[in-house]
């Protein structure tokens, strides 16, 4: 059957009309709007970033930041719920030029600070770079914000903390962020609960991370390098895990537990070339397991007089030995230390290896420690203070060399 050009043309028009009808949602000729949809604010269409933020309704929405460098002289403030503040990767650069100690970005609802029923919920910051200067304040400051989520954010060069989460109680998350060169703490967690810090990088802040007066920190898979002070400092916190992190070349101590910490596991971390390793200043019911302590200048692991009921299992304390009588590091960079006990009690130390550490594999400092199980460890080329332990059990394998 032959079709005339007129028939074919009519068919084409019919198909186009039908597609248009379906695209409009059926019989209604008016443009459709998805019920419940919230706006996407294109910040490029506004005179300032704050104007774009203010364009969001109280119930929130998405703010899309264009690529570019955007200088600010006073803090940006987000006070709505359910906000996605999204950049274009590091091509979006928010630069705080303020020199009066003010933060770059504040997430806060003033009414929520005193009234917990009015607190802010569900703010996500992602895919942008935010920097300051040595006279500016914190980079990102969040006060009393529940379920805050930072992902893929670069936070650098601020005069205060890089990121400060103050009583962001419910489920704060910081993942895949780069936190560098801030004058105070890289990530400062105060009064937070059920915290996830994962797959982020910290470099050359004063301290890398503080978790004070909190609960249930899960810190895993992070790289902590070259800090001017300490690495991870945890105080008055319980039920937490610090595992699978690389903590290298901190001038201070890699991990500190203080002020009534309990129920914390420190496991499978690489603790390398730091001023000190793990310092249990005031910690109870904690486990230190499967960590590698290499070329730690002093006190790879220290358990102080205010700590007790600690298990130390499966750790490796070593220098830079690479086999065949060779060490990797030069003679002026060979310091490696072991375990120091300072008047503690109820400690189990088993299944560890201590090789070529100084001054001793186990050093007892000051008042003798009591009720210590020091058993089933391997000691290679070291001295040890076993005889100074009181009411303790000592059974180990001692070797002079390989």
Image (tube, rainbow, N blue to C red):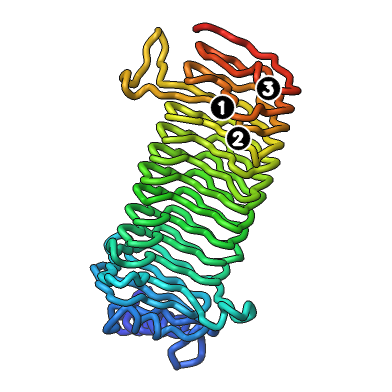
Q: 146 or 65, which lies in front?
A: 146
| Element marked by disc 1 | strand
Residue marked by disc 1: 339
For disc 2, the neighbor class at 10 Å (few under 14, some 14 to 19, many from 20) is many
> Which residue shows up at 47% across the image and 16% down it?
356
**Does 284 sit left or right of 339 as displayed?**
right
- Sequence order check: which comes first, mark 3 or mark 2? 2
**Does 391 sit left or right of 95 as displayed?**
right
Residue 112 seen in the current view: yes
Query: Against 247, is 75 above or below?
Result: below
Whole-percent x, y for residue 338 in the image: 52, 25
> Which residue shows up at 29% across the image and 81% down it?
48
Which dot marks residue 389?
3
Label pair 3/2, CB-CB below 8 angstroms: no
Residue marked by disc 2: 303
Q: Name the quadrant of the N terminus.
A: bottom left
Label pair 1/2, CB-CB below 8 angstroms: yes
- Sequence order check: which comes first, mark 1 or mark 3? 1
Whole-percent x, y for residue 281 in the image: 59, 42
> Which residue shows up at 52% across the image and 59% down it?
189
Q: 292 or 339, which lies in front?
A: 339
Query: Against 123, is 401 above or below?
Result: above
Query: From mark 1 to mark 2, how far is it between C-alphas?
Result: 8 Å
Whole-percent x, y for residue 111 in the image: 55, 83
Which dot marks residue 172?
none
Residue 12 seen in the current view: no
- Sequence order check: which comes first, mark 1 or mark 2? 2
| Element marked by disc 3 | loop
Whole-percent x, y for residue 355 in the image: 50, 17
Query: From mark 3 to mark 2, how far is it between C-alphas?
Result: 14 Å
């Amino acid at each position: 059957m032959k079709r005339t050009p007129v028939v074919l043309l009519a068919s084409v028009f019919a198909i186009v009309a039908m597609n248009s009808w379906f695209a409009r949602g059926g019989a209604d000729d008016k443009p459709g709007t998805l019920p419940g949809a919230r706006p996407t604010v294109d910040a490029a269409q506004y005179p300032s970033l704050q104007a774009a933020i203010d364009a969001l309704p109280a119930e929130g929405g998405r703010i899309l930041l264009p690529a570019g460098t955007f200088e600010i002289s006073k803090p940006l403030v987000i006070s709505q719920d359910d906000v996605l503040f999204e950049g274009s990767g590091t091509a979006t650069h928010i630069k705080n030029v303020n020199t009066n100690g003010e933060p770059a970005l504040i997430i806060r609802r003033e009414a929520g600070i005193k009234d917990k029923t009015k607190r802010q919920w569900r703010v996500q910051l992602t895919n942008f770079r935010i920097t300051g200067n040595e006279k500016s304040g914190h980079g990102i400051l969040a006060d009393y914000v529940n379920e805050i989520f930072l992902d893929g954010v670069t936070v650098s060069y601020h005069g205060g903390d890089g990121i400060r989460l103050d009583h962001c109680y419910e489920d704060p998350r910081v993942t895949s962020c780069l936190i560098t060169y801030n004058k105070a703490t890289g990530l400062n967690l105060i009064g937070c609960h059920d915290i996830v810090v994962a797959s982020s990088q910290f470099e050359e802040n004063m301290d890398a991370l503080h978790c004070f007066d909190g609960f249930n920190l899960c810190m895993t898979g992070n790289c902590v390098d070259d800090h001017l002070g300490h690495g991870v400092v945890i105080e008055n916190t319980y039920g937490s895990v610090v595992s699978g992190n690389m903590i290298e070349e901190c001038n201070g101590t890699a991990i500190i537990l203080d002020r009534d910490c309990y129920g914390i596991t420190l496991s499978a971390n690489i603790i390398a070339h730091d001023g000190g390793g793990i310092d249990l200043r005031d910690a109870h019911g904690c486990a230190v397991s499967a960590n590698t302590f290499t070329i730690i200048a002093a006190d790879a692991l220290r358990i102080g007089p205010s700590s007790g009921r600690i298990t130390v299992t499966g750790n490796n304390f070593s220098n830079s030995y690479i086999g065949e009588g060779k060490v990797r590091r030069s003679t002026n960079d060979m310091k490696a230390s072991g375990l120091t006990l300072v008047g503690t009690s109820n400690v189990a130390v088993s299944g560890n290896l201590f090789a070529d550490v100084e001054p001793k594999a186990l050093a007892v400092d000051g008042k003798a420690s009591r009720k210590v199980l020091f058993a089933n460890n391997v000691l290679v080329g070291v001295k040890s203070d076993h005889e100074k332990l009181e009411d303790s059990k000592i059974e180990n394998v001692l070797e002079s060399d390989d």
